[in-house]
Structures are given as structure tokens and as C-alpha cells.
Amino acid sequence: MSRFWSAVTHGLTPYVPGEQPKIDNLVKLNTNEHPYGPSPRVIEAIQAAASDALRLYPDPNADRLKLALAARHGVRPDQVFVGNGSDEVLAHAFLGLLKHELPLWMPDISYSFYPVYCGLYEIAHRIIPLTEDFTLRVEDYLPQGERRAGAIIFPNPNAPTGRLLPLEAVERIVAGNPEAVVLVDEAYVDFGGDSAIPLVDRYPNLLVVHTFSKSRSLAGLRVGFAIGHADLIAGLERVKNSFNSYPLDRLAIAGAVASVEDEAYFQQSCRKVIASREALSTQMTELGFDVLPSAANFIFARHPSRDGAELAAALRQRAIIVRHFKAARIDQFLRITVGTDEQCAALVTALRKILHA
Ligand code: PMP
């Protein structure tokens, strides 16, 4: 280790992003991107924004996007925060809203960036196991005598399991912890869940985070947002303006606004992924896999008699990449992004061959 490394950087355990392979012709089912492209109106808007105006800084507040999102979700613009991907929105939330003298509560199986932010910002946290069937038990997230949460975060639908917590259950957690910020990370909610956004006006402690990377086919544009009480949003703005006051560039703002304005395309492309997910789940079940019910754009499945890591390696040999986590309780599972119909067919054919070899 170089003597110039500080103790802080040395102590960090960074997030390891899912692989982004440099070779073409792979069936890439490992990082939950949308299998189809964004609305043509998004491409047109970005092309129009790629002009001489790029010499100017973008709007630091991305007001056009906040207005569009506020109208889409039935809130006021001062209840909307936007950032460079939901990872950045989450980063600001961890520092500005979730850091507390009491520990932050989160599930043991969830988005693996959460513990990374806890490490970066030195946030005490308590990891709560999901149940045997990988569901989140509401009672575990309610104050227990002296034991209270400083804040709570969970993904809904969960990543990587895909399991959905019904909205009534989310509300019980939010209502049961009025002193704690509850952050619901809804990166995948458009694929079959009920968003908690309609609850934000009733609960000033609720923050809901969304991304354009999944249901809006815009992982490459890096746009995410949060909706909550104006005071929570003001807290996020303070952190953002202490870090990077121009998180969204002109192209991202233009493309994201166009995406929000094309509701019909959005609805239709979500429906397509949901239909493909159901078909893929059925086919995987027929191959003998245990497939968890999914409300996301991926499925989480294990084979009772095959090792998860070996299956992932065998698929890779056939140029299909899926996600395998070497983590306790889930190391027999594969997390498989729902692809195009052709990609799903290639996956099922490859699995059939591997299982019958
Ligand atoms: N939350 C969850 C649960 C995710 O799976 C992801 C994607 N890896 C993100 C947030 C971050 O997405 P992005 O930064 O692309 O908006």
C-alpha cells in the first residue's frame, strides 16, 4: 500500500458494480437494465439538446424535470429531489437524513450499496434478517421497548430477491416510527408494486427513491429522484449543494423530461417486461427451479440439486451472464434480469442443456 493512502480510504469497503462486459453478442442478464430502448421522444430531446448551449452550465435545480415529476406523481415541485442516478440520491440521503445517533435498520438481504454508504459515512446500523421465505416482517421494524431505529431503509420490491412488501405493510412501518426517517427504495416498483409516494403527504418521515435506470430504459443517462416532505427534500438539497451543485447535465435533463412526458410508452414497456417475467418464471419452474415471486424486472431462482456458482459459470461459457452473489443464505440463487423474448429463450435453452448434460 502506498504511504499516501489515508487511513480513511484504506478502511473503506467499496461497492463492486455488476460486470459491464466490453464484448458484444453476450446475452447480458446481470444488471437489471431494461431489455428495450427508451422512448424515441427521449432520443429526439437529447439530440435537440446536443447544441451550442452545451457551453452553458445546466439548471442546477433541474426545475423542468422537477415540475414534470411533480405533475406525474401528484406532488409539489418542492417535494422532488433529482440526482445523478438513484445511487447519488441514496448517497446524499445516507449522509443528510439517515445518519443518526441511533442505528439505521435494514434487511440482511438487500441492495449491497447500503452497507457501503454506512462505511463511508460512519453510520451505525443494525442488520435485520429476512424471514425464511425472504419476506420482510413488519414487527421487526417497529420500536421494541428501548430499541428504536434512528432511520430505516429497505428496497421495495426487494433487490435481489424481487419480493414485494404490500403497501399496507410499508405504511405500518412508516407510521410505527414517526421519529425516524423511513427510506423506501423503489428502484423496481414500476414492474408490479404499489408505490408509497401517495403516502408522503401523510407521513413527513417518509422518503421514496426512484430511478430512470430500470423502468424508463435510461441506465446510461444516470437519473434518479426522491419524493417526500419538503423538509426532507430541503435536507437533500443542502447536501447536494455541498457536493456537486450540477448533478444532472443538459442532456440528462432533456432526456428525462421527455421520458416522463411519454407516459404511454412507459406503461407499454413496463407491461411487456412483466409479461416476459411471468413467462420466464413459468419456464424456469418447469425446469425444476424454485423461483421466488417477483415484482421486479428480474427473477431470483435456485435449483434444488445444482450449485448456484456452477450454474452461473456454465451459463457464462455459453455467453450468457447472470448475477450470482457469494453471500450467506443466497449463494445458491441466480438473479436473472428479464431480457428480450429472444434472450429469455436463449437462457432457457442453455439451462435445459446444462441440466441435462
Ligand atoms: N437501488 C436498487 C435497489 C438498485 O438495485 C439499484 C441498481 N443497482 C439502484 C438503487 C441504483 O440505480 P441507479 O443508480 O442506476 O439509479
Image: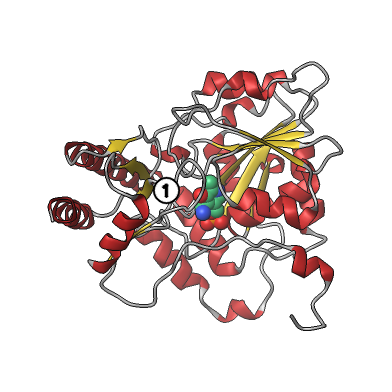
In the image, residue 241 sits, relative to residue 352, either above or below, namely below
Give the quadrant of the N terminus: bottom right
Residue 17 at what x, y percent from top left? 53, 63
Instruction: Identify the residue at horizontal 68%, vertical 63% (top origin).
Output: 59
At mark 1, the secondary structure is: loop
In the image, residue 91 sits, relative to residue 1, either above or below, namely above
Q: Nearer the viewer, residue 163 or 334?
A: 334
Instruction: Identify the residue at horizontal 81%, vertical 66% (top origin).
Output: 8
Residue 203 at what x, y percent from top left? 70, 25
Give the quadrant of the C terminus: bottom left
- Residue 92 visible from this viewpoint: no
Residue 87, quarter of the rendered image: bottom right
Is ligand 1 less than 8 Å from the beta carbon at label 1? no
Left or right of 84 in this view: 354: left
Q: How is the image coloured?
A: secondary structure
Instruction: Identify the residue at horizontal 58%, vertical 27% (top origin).
Output: 198
Left or right of 227 in this view: 102: right
- Residue 339 visible from this viewpoint: yes
Q: Nearer the viewer, residue 26 or 258?
A: 26
Say few, some or many: other residues with alpha carbon within 10 Å of mark 1 (under 14 / 14 to 19 / 20 or more): many
